[in-house]
Image: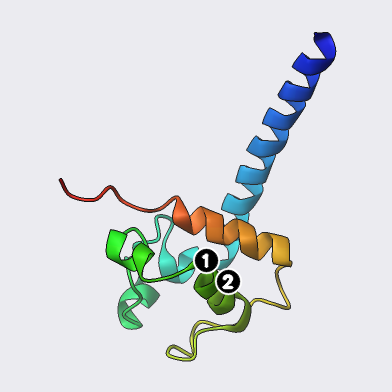
Amino acid sequence: MMKRLVLVLSLGGATSAHADAVADVWKAKCTVCHGGDGKARTKMGQKESIGDMSRPDWQRARTDADLREVIANGDPSNRKMKPFKDKLTPAQIDALVGYIRTMKAPAAP
């Protein structure tokens, strides 16, 4: 019983640490343009007409593979979105995709 409790506590800590690490990557690499909440209400976000990631239609219009591609290789429609494949690991890119998915605002009733 004690081993299970320790394992659960360890996994919970790892999950929390992972969430903190993803948030740190987002803050360091993404907030300048996309903002902390993904709504792109930043000077650069407004200047470049960056989409609001929290909008349900924005979320539906992009697959996880689409998001990975843009993060890794940049956005051909917006050259300000530089590729991060040489700065982030594939695991960090996957984590950012998951993080972006948490920004989805609830759909209107």
Q: Which mark is residue 68?
A: 2
Is 92 rendered above or below residue 70? above
Q: Quadrant of the N terminus?
A: top right
Q: Please say whether residue 40 is visible from this viewpoint.
A: no
Residue 68 locus on image (x, y percent): 58, 71
The amino acid marked with disc number 2 is: Arg
For the residue carrying disc 1, how many other residues have a C-alpha within 10 Å: few (<14), some (14-19), or many (20+)?
few
Q: Position of residue 44 (x, y in %)?
A: 39, 76
Q: Residue furthest left?
A: 109
Please name the residue shown 75% across and 15% down the image: 5
| Protein image colouring | rainbow
* Measured Cα–Cα span from mark 2 to mark 1: 6 Å
What is the secondary structure assignment of the residue under circle 2?
Answer: helix
| x and y, in percent, of residue 80 in the image | 48, 86
Disc 1 is placed on an element classified as helix
**Residue located 76% across and 27% down the image:** 10
Q: Are marks 2 and 1 in contact (CB under 8 Å)?
A: yes
In the rendered structure, the answer to whether residue 69 lies left or right of residue 32 reads right
Residue found at x 34% / y 58%? 54
Q: Amino acid at mark 1?
A: Asp
The dot on residue 64 is 1
Q: Hey, which quadrant is residue 38 in on the image?
A: bottom left
Mark carried by residue 88 = none
